[in-house]
Amino acid sequence: MKNGCAVCEAKMVHGYKSEERILKPMIRKNGKLEPVSMDEAVKKAAQILTDAKYPLLFGWSSTVNEAQRIGVELAEELGSALDNCCSVCHGPSVMATQEVGIPAATLGQIRHRADLIVYWACNPWTSHPRHVERYTAFTDGRFEGSEWKSYMNKMKASASRKKMDIASKRIEREEAQINPQVEVNGPPPQTLQKPGRKMIVVDVRKTMSAEAADYFMQIEPNRDYDVIEALRCIVQDQELDVEKVGGVPVEYLREVADAMMKCEFGVIYFGLGMTQSLGRFRNIEVAIALARDLNRKTKFIISPMRGHFNVTGANQVFAWQTGYPYAIDFSQGYPQFNPGENTAVDLLKREDNDATLVISADPGAHFPSVVMKNMMKHPLITINPDMNAISRLGDVVFPTQWCGIEYVGTAYRMDSVPITLKKVVEAPPGVLTDEELLSKILAEVREIKKKRGLPVGLTEQKIVHTEPIEPPRVCPAPVTKPKPKKVVKKKKEAA
Amino acid sequence: MVEQKLRATLITGRTIEQGVGKELGKGSVEYYDSCAVCFFDKSDMQKIGIKNGSTVKVTSKYGSVIVKAQRYPWGTNPGMVFIPCGSWANCITGDETFSMGMPLFKGFPVEVESAPNQPVLTLDELLLKQFGRNSL
């Protein structure tokens, strides 16, 4: 494996074959999980789902689009609620985009053209470890160079300063003078107005990403909305009659706004710090409005830092199939969308659903335990390759293959570009793909409904990718037309 | 003077160690070591008299959890504590969604107190305590 980050290496080298891997379907009997045959587990799962009045199908973010599509069909067949992990990560971003639209670009555009990169309330160094290096500040684009060298110089300078300090302490043999604590929220450096690539990090706490940035602006928790609104005022040449906004002096904000207006191609990447703080989707809405205002002066785009590798794909597939990206309710026989009512956490909080199917997600570890307690009151079916927290709690536990490692499929990148995932190794025997497993459950659900004399859906899903796809095609060399030979007119021989 | 309780704002979020731990397996030692911790500012640690590796009890309106204390390595953030997202952090996160589907993960008040000699539960023990079942 080449060019993988730490998380990638953990998953693709060690994780997929770890001791935590599930190899057989299991059913909880007398409080203990016991291995059973695949057919028995499928029958049990289909029975639970059809017996339930209002099941919830949740997850979908770490599986491929082909499986998500069958998931939508299953939800429609069951008349259930359908939600993906987006509701606890970038759901508010989706809501804000529906309100005001979004000026977006693909990562390639940013890599080659962006000269100002703002990471707002996110820490790409830990959650997207290759993002800065591959697409933004530390990459060499066609029109913008890498900032890596200036960062290395900064690191060297700080290291030599530390060495000098230590040496001076030894020479003086006195108690070292304690340096005054560096003011975290200092003024922006002069270099912020320089041409070339610049990186600004805005967050409530200092992180490794902030360390690598040209300027780190620390704001108070839950004050993102105020700070962005202040920046909008400055961009629109309005006066602010306060000294500080969200803990940041207005002069500093003015310099940041100047850098934003002077750049040639700017980008704001925002993370969960915005969507999970007070204000939720209003934070994103105002950030998109800031990008819109800046577009009157220069070129600016804004993009969410999506988490799970295919959470964007889940939004895309759900929107393509039902018209809505998440928080979908099929109980009336047609899709309805209402975040805050049909979102997983709200459903569980109100105890509306009476069975749950979780696929390729781990609400056991990532939902507040106060709502998880309500999920545990009803039967729980889990489909995950490894024994994560939710599989440990399941009543029917299915194993599945790792997509992108053991089978092929399609996933959407954070900038909504579909990518084909490759197969690298063979899956353990007897373990099905998400797609095959969901098709089996769907067929079984239809069988049960037919026996009960209920109407069932007409379409039969066909599994799309069972064979490995062809290797990526190499772009053919441009066809050059053969140059016409110069016809040399023979001079008429002089008679 | 050492105080009994520290009132602080809790932020939960990703760390690279948590990312690596979760991919190695939720039952792995790496996951336990990276998630069952709470990061403090140095001044806050002195206030309640704890050191790196001490056990602390973090309590919110929604519950409480015992985790290990660690000093936050970057910058100064007095009054703010950070727990990497995972089963331990979610013992104390809230179900208030403000009608938007997003529960309380960041920026809400908690109280922290020193809890010497209290065990930090493993994932299976935590699940058994909270939901009465696990994979064992």
Image (spheres, rainbow, N blue to C red):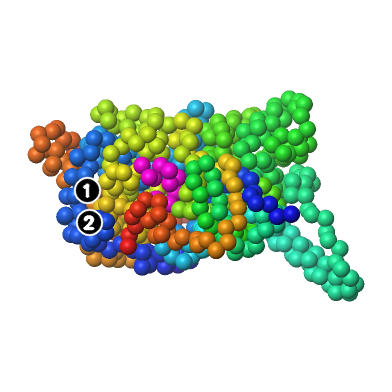
Q: Amino acid at mark 1?
A: Ala
Q: Which residue is under mark 2?
A: A29
Q: Nearer the viewer, residue A490 or A325?
A: A325
Have a look at marks 1 and 2 and say if they share a chain.
Answer: yes
Q: Residue at 47% of width from left, 49% of height from top?
A: B91
Q: Is residue A464 visible?
A: no
| Residue beneath the point at 50% across and 62% down | B119
Question: Whole-percent x and y of residue A490?
Answer: 49, 55
Within 10 Å of disc 1 (Cα), the crowding (few <14, some 14-19, many 20+) is many
The answer to whether residue B95 is left or right of residue A26 is right
Magenta span: chief secondary structure: helix
**Which image quadrant for residue B68?**
bottom right
Q: Quadrant of residue A48?
A: top left
Give left or right: position of A137 versus A427.
Answer: right
Q: In this image, B35 relative to A422: left or right?
A: right
Tell me the chain of label 1. Answer: A
Disc 1 marks which residue?
A45
* Spatial separation of the CA atoms under disc 1 and disc 2: 14 Å
Q: Does the magenta run of residues contain A369?
A: yes
* Amino acid beneath label 2: Lys
Q: Earlier in the sequence, mark 1 or mark 2?
A: 2
The quarter of the picture where residue A315 lies is top left
Q: Which residues are magenta?
A: A364-374
| Residues marked 1 and 2 touching at CB (< 8 Å) | no
Taking A305 as reference, is A225 left or right?
right
Q: Secondary structure at mark 2?
A: strand
User: So how many labels did they put on this image?
Assistant: 2
Quarter of the image with the N terminus of chain A is bottom left
- At 18% across and 35% down in the image, what residue appears? A457
Q: Chain of mark 2?
A: A
Give the residue at x 22% y 48%.
Answer: A45
Q: Is residue B33 above or below residue B87?
A: below
